[in-house]
Amino acid sequence: MNPRYFPLAATIAIFIVAYAVCIGQYPNMLSTRVIGNLLTDNAFLGIAAVGMTFVILSGGIDLSIGAVIAFTGVFLAVLLEKTSIHPLVAFALALAITTAFGALMGAIIHHLEMPPFIVTLAGMFLARGMAFVLSIDSIPIKHPFYATLKGIYYKLPGGGRITFIGGLMLVVFAAGILIAHRTRFGANVYALGGGAPTARLMGVPIGRTTILIYALSGFLAGLSGIVFSLYTSAGYSLATVGVELDAIAAVVIGGTLLTGGSGFVAGTLVGILIQGLIQTYITFDGSLSSWWTKILIGLLLFAFILLQKGLIHLTDRRRRHA
Amino acid sequence: MQPVNSYVLSATGIDKIFPGARALNGVDFSLRRGEVHALLGENGAGKSTLVKCLTGAYRRDGGRILLDGADIDPQSTLEAQNLGIGTVYQEVNLLPNLTVAENLFLGRQPKRFGLIDTREMNRRARALLAEYELDIDVTAELAAYSVAVQQVVAIARAVDLSGKVLILDEPTASLDAHEVAMLFRIVRRLRERGLGIVFITHFLEQVYDLSDRITVLRNGQLVGTRETADLPRRDLIAMMLGRELVEEVATEHAAKAADGEVRFRFRGFGRKGHIEPFDLDVRAGEVVGIAGLLGSGRTETAEILFGAERADSGTAETSGRALDLSSPRAAIREKFGFCPEDRKVDGIVGDLSVRENIALALQARRGWARPISRAEQDRLADQYIKALDIRTSDREKPIKLLSGGNQQKAILARWLATNPDFLILDEPTRGIDVGAHAEIIRLIESLCEKGMSLIVISSELEELVAYSHRVIVLRDRAHVAELVGEEVTTAGIVEAIAASAGRADA
Amino acid sequence: MTSTLKAYAVRLFPQVAALVVILLMVSFAFPDFFRLEMQNGRLYGSLIDILNRGAPVALLAIGMTVVIATKGIDLSVGAVMAICGAVAAACITSGYGLVGTLLVTLGTGILCGLWNGVLVAVLDIQPIIATLVLMVAGRGIAQLITEGAILTFNDPGLIFIGSGSLLGLPMPVVIWLVFGLVVSLVVRRTALGMLIEALGVNRRASMLSGVSTGVLLIAAYVLCGLCAAIAGIIAAADIRGADANNAGLWLELDAILAVVVGGNSLLGGRFSIAASLLGALIIQSVNTGILLSGFPPEFNLIIKAAIIVLILVIQSPRAQSAFVFLSRSQGAAPAKTEEEAK
């Protein structure tokens, strides 16, 4: 097998084994209900993680997404409470703002040649601050359109439901896979992650690609914010703290190299599902505590970093002896 | 057949000036259609600077470049590529994490319904590589293939994109004989197609095997362009190393040949893949020169003696006691010192001051808990700034702001401050101006008079002859000859280097 | 000696000036700002408050400065704070005594630093990635120790560390001032400072000059872990309990920010612990100042973001080359760059 599929295969294998273990202990977990809930509960995280996948594939990082999700939620809540515009218009506005916000960060990263870590850290503070400025309270969203959207679902055999937001996540992943592998932009993202100087020599427009990557991440964080507001029917500026960490973990556990250039959007989906599975298992178990999630995810993270370190070492050696 | 003297590319009077150094000085270079033209010279001779001027990676400071008779002035490698000049570097300039097909078609992927048509792209990639007799899985990552295959892919991309001139910069440096043969078949076929091919290498056999003409650069100047068939190997080496073959009588140095006790004794010292095991004796107050062409194992010898690469065979001892050379730190404890060839990467600590750079090795040897007082550091720095005539406005200036020669002297000072018994100098005079050259040579002589043992690696043969008591000649990562006393002449060294399999020798 | 002092003054001037300006601005909005009172042998006042509340970030900034000087970064310090707070609470409630508790807790911090250091120095993993592991898992480990609850304690000795006072100053202030001074003295009075700077600027050249780069790297992360442990003890002692969820939350970012505000380059090399401590005070002054001057605290983060952007622009390579260009064109001697013929 092509070694670049190793991490993805490992991720899928871990998911299957883990799911099998879960079912072994709690046969109830083998139901479409559980799967449906897995998708719904992790929809906002999954959508944001698609954006993070692109950022990490390009060799960058985006710490701002949790704050942007919270900002979007508060923005929508305030807009829908104070004005009478239709949620769809509010959605469009929110997406325009978050996309422009991402593009701005990308432009700073490219033009000021500053590390993405610090630029998006400032972005994180700014977005969270703007959310605070809009409102520090949790504002409920009671617009009937929200109820309509939440009412949309596709019934699976066995009683499970693919809700609107769960379905939206799957659509976003499908679109992400298409963009990553079937567009020139996608190829350029991988090229950037493989080495910016070489990519430049090969004619990749570095600046435009960088800006687009962070704009995409901003757009998806905004979309994730919309989904989160649908999920919670509220906007709260203290929500989704640390979601960027969960997203990074999902991307790495999904087999993407944290240094960029290698990985799959589809892997991130499996990474999200593994995280969701751990949580579901802990809920089913009842006696296990929630902190095991973090420890297990940390361990998985470590295992994947080591696996990839080993793979790089291996290909290096193989090439030298080839 | 094309007419013989139809030049596809001709450059005249190319100048390139860097702050503090003139990298190219009025260099002429012309390339015919359908020829392989070898561009030769030691490190720092200006080969890559010339190539970068031709491909737009550098802006030239003077001169004209004509492509197909028309003036060109490429601002970037991309522009040069679009004009018809493609380049393939030793470090393959493709992306190892993309598939072969993606590498070939990055930025110009075939599309269908607005999306990349992967199947069509892979088909075209296979068709393109078939012209190069390469039948590989184009959907696998480039990293999965050997450097040789990567080179061919890079050549295929460059030729497909440009198609008039192909510049190969050290393409064979990490290939085995079989792979080189494959590469040469491809290059010959491209030559038949009428491409002008510039071939940079340091393997002279390959030059004679493949090239039609040879241009030699030295210290940024054109030494000459000759037909390969008319240039015997000895003359070529003389052109590269800068000495017309006059029979030189061994000068004064023969008289002072050290005959004292052997102080350092290496037996079967070597490391697989770096340098073949060698025996070496060095006496007190002796300068042992090391000569050889680029890639012959010069730097590898230095690194293994200093523990920067750990030896995996052999022994090292001094006055009957085994030496611990397992790491630079251990070697420094044995009173070894090493001025590396690549000053910027391995030598200077750029942001730190001249004072700190001079004190660094001594401080490291004393350990962190026994700091050299500031007054003592100042005294050390002032002493060496004066003794070695390091030109700096003051000792607190960041060393990166000094010129190359002064950086080199500061690094030398770093080691002299540790009062070493055994000092290894790798290309101590490279890239520094002529005045500093002479000073460093004088310094080497005075150090050895004081009883220090020195190993000096240099591609400046006259210098090597001037101060060495003995010269070890390296070839193909092995020590192949040792010249002692009256044998130490530039002619002798050139002879020893050239005395290889030598089938292409005229 | 005077020249060294002068160099210090020049280095710290921007941070001192910024701090003074911020304090003055706050005092306009809040006239009582500079008032200090002595009550029960302890000083009270807004300035003391800034020093006291800034203690955790100041402590973290000490270790972070050294790690960043080696061209690294430590994302895990917030999580390590939580772990150490939890360990301290668990130890004291299970009867280890004050000394035993402190020793075990500091040992835990050192162990966490060792883990990070080994990943970076021995396994050669990028610092940002290596320390991410503990950042993610650390809070879970802390919760494992406290079993999810806020583990409270009432040992007077431990509480004294959080809210006691010594020589009129709150204990946390005494601790970070003393620790900052000790670490500064140790790195500057020994050769450690210079060796760390050399390592951060050019690891290979330092290694070839005989510097034990691996040991130094690990030591930097160990120091960072130790700082996080002390900060964790203070945070726990302050609230008389270990809160695994919130102790040290996002403080790694504040610590990095303090180092950057202190004018230390994220690319490693030259560092000044005093400047980072001033950076931490600047951040805390902004926080406290916004609170006192009646601004809604919501603006706090926006101002922080603005500060980062400002510093980014000043530090960015492009802006710096523009500065160099300006100073050159003003007739200064043309500095020779390191660029030369290859």
Image: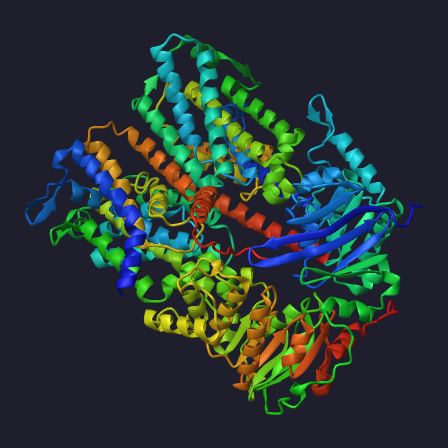
Residue C145 visible within the image: no
Relative to residue C97, is residue A37 drawn left or right? right
Vertical position of residue B442 compared to residue B341: above or below = below
> Which residue ends up furthest to the right in the rendered image?
B1
Q: Indicate whether C51 appears above or below C122.
A: above
Quarter of the image for the N terminus of chain A: give it. top right
Colour scheme in the image? rainbow
B136 and B493: which is toward the camera: B493
Residue A22 in picture, x, y percent from top left: 51, 35
In this view, C315 is above or below B267: above
Q: Residue furthest front?
A: C331
* Residue at horizontal 67 percent and vertical 63 percent from the top: B219
Give the quadrant of residue B486.
bottom right
In the drawing, does residue B44 fall left or right of residue B204?
left
User: Eyeballing the image, is B194 above or below B115?
Assistant: below
Question: From where the camera sits, is residue B371 visible?
Answer: yes
From the viewer's side, name the closer residue of A128 and B313. A128
C222 or C198: which is nearer to us? C198
- x and y percentages locating residue C138 in the rendered image: 39, 45
Q: Quadrant of residue A15?
A: top right
Where residue C242 appears, x then y in whole percent?
A: 27, 43
Q: Residue at x 73, y 56 (%)?
A: B170
- Quadrant location of residue B253? bottom right
> Front-most of A306 and A289?
A306
